[in-house]
């Protein structure tokens, strides 16, 4: 089949032309490896020039709405789609691409698939016209996939009896594998013997990250040499907390090293419109590295951890979180069972596309 993926160029702050990452890269590459003809149309908002590259059997093109304007962007997408003549347009990365994908699929008589990894309506809750257009795209798509069953159920509620939304889970990229802990700490300049817990991800009050600081204080009162390692750009009050080590932004190649340097990885989500449908990639990556995890038990996280209660604590409960961290440090456990990689997830998407094509 001929497959076009439609995606923003910078999902989760990664430039997909320079930093291949996650489902945005590995699903197109996996389908190309299965013998399909695949291209990816990327859109950016940073006044970047248009460009085109080929990588891993996939043709990647990029256009910028600030440089071309909305009309120019749509003309460029239309022209490429007319030349490629896809059987399927697979829209992903946020609600805008579901809306654009619906237009392209209708105009070029292609089938429409929509893939979602978050509740996109939570990104801009005020933009009701976009939400209505997104739901219309969901209703007209022949295939809808989601990163987990909770999100699939939400998307299905907007489809009004159409074919059920399917699950395409998150997975870790191939570089996330177990590594030597002492060697990893040496690379990053972290202390060899101190117990280290860490949080890798965005810092936001509505994600419960300040709860993590509270839990860390409580755990450190019982274990004074405990340290909390943070990457990225956490707020000043987090970096000022005694026992916190800030590493700043870590290059992609060092992220597996950071996870392997930790004794416990902390995953924090909240019971919000976003958190109730969030499937953290960093949780997949920590599990792939075989590092013990303590996580807040939203329904998606509980599903990802297969109800392994030893790793789970109630949402917004710093006392329970601190106790679970101390217990995990005393008795480490990281038996997560077999997890699908991107190759298996791409294979599932291939089967779903084939099934919808055969049933048409």
Image (cartoon, rainbow, N blue to C red):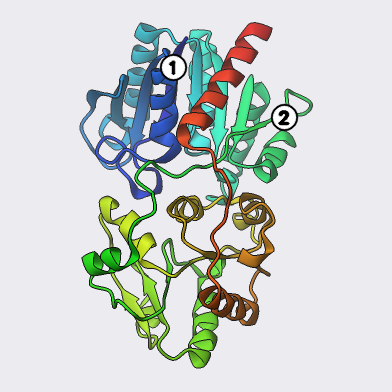
Q: Residue drawn at (40%, 88%), measured in percent from left and top?
A: 225
Give the foreground label among 1 and 2: 1
- Report crowding for label 2: few under 14, some 14 to 19, many 20 or more residues within 10 A (C-alpha): many
Q: Percent x, y for residue 329?
A: 51, 76
Q: Which residue, given by chain and number where applicable, does mark 2 sit on?
A: 159
| Near-viewer residue (69 or 342) | 342
Placement of 198 over or under 286, stated as above or below? below
Split into 4 quadrants, where in the image is the C terminus?
Answer: top right
Q: What distance separates the C-alpha of mark 1 from that of mark 2?
A: 30 Å
Q: Is residue 14 visible?
A: yes
Q: Which residue lies most toward the right here?
A: 161
**Does residue 208 appear to the left or right of 138 in the view shown?**
left
Q: Which mark sits nearer the N-terminus, 1 or 2?
A: 1
Secondary element under disc 2, as helix, strand or loop, is loop
Mark 1–mark 2 CB contact (< 8 Å):
no
Q: Which residue, given by chain and number where applicable, does mark 1 sit on?
A: 34
Q: Residue drawn at (58%, 34%), measured in percent from left and top?
A: 168
For residue 339, what is the image quadrant? top right
Placement of 264 over or under 27, stated as above or below? below
**Does residue 182 appear to the left or right of 87 in the view shown?**
left
Q: Percent x, y for residue 38?
A: 39, 17
| Near-viewer residue (308 or 152) | 308
Q: Percent x, y for residue 289?
A: 43, 54
- Report crowding for label 1: few under 14, some 14 to 19, many 20 or more residues within 10 A (C-alpha): few
Q: Is residue 360 visible?
A: no
Secondary element under disc 1, as helix, strand or loop, is loop
| Near-viewer residue (284 or 59) | 284
Q: Residue drawn at (57%, 53%), measured in percent from left and top?
A: 336
| Near-viewer residue (153 or 104) | 153
- The disc placed on residue 341 is none
**Does residue 170 appear to the left or right of 58 in the view shown?**
right
């Amino acid at each position: 089949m001929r497959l076009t993926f439609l995606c923003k160029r910078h999902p989760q702050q990664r430039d997909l032309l320079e930093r291949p990452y996650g489902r945005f890269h590995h699903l197109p590459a996996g389908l190309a490896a299965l013998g399909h003809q695949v291209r990816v149309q990327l859109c950016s908002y940073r006044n970047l020039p248009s460009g085109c590259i080929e990588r891993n059997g996939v043709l990647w093109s990029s256009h910028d709405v600030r440089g071309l304007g909305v009309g120019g962007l749509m003309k460029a997408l239309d022209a490429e789609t007319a030349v490629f003549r896809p059987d399927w347009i697979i829209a992903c990365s946020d609600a805008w691409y579901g809306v654009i994908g619906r237009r392209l699929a209708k105009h070029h008589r292609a089938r429409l698939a929509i893939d979602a990894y978050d509740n996109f309506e939570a990104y801009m809750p005020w933009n009701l016209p976009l939400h209505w257009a997104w739901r219309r795209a969901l209703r007209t798509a022949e295939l809808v996939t989601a990163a987990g069953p909770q999100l699939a159920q939400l998307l299905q509620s907007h489809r009004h009896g159409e074919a059920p939304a399917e699950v395409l889970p998150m997975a870790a990229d191939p570089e996330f594998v177990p590594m030597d802990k002492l060697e990893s700490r040496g690379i990053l300049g972290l202390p060899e013997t101190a117990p280290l817990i860490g949080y890798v991800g965005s810092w936001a009050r509505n994600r419960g990250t300040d709860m993590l600081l509270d839990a860390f204080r409580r755990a450190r009162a019982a274990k004074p040499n405990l340290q909390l390692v943070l990457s990225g750009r956490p707020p000043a009050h987090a970096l000022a907390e005694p026992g916190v080590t800030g590493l700043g932004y870590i290059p992609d190649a060092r992220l597996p090293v950071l996870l392997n340097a930790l004794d416990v990885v902390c995953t924090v989500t909240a019971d919000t419109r976003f958190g109730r449908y969030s499937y953290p990639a960093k949780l997949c990556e920590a599990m792939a590295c075989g590092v013990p995890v303590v996580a807040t038990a939203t329904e998606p996280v509980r599903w990802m951890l297969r109800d392994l209660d030893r790793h789970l604590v109630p949402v917004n409960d710093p006392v329970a979180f601190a106790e679970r961290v101390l217990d995990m440090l005393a008795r480490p456990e990281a038996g997560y069972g077999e997890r699908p990689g991107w190759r298996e997830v791409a294979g599932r998407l291939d089967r779903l596309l084939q099934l919808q094509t055969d049933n048409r």
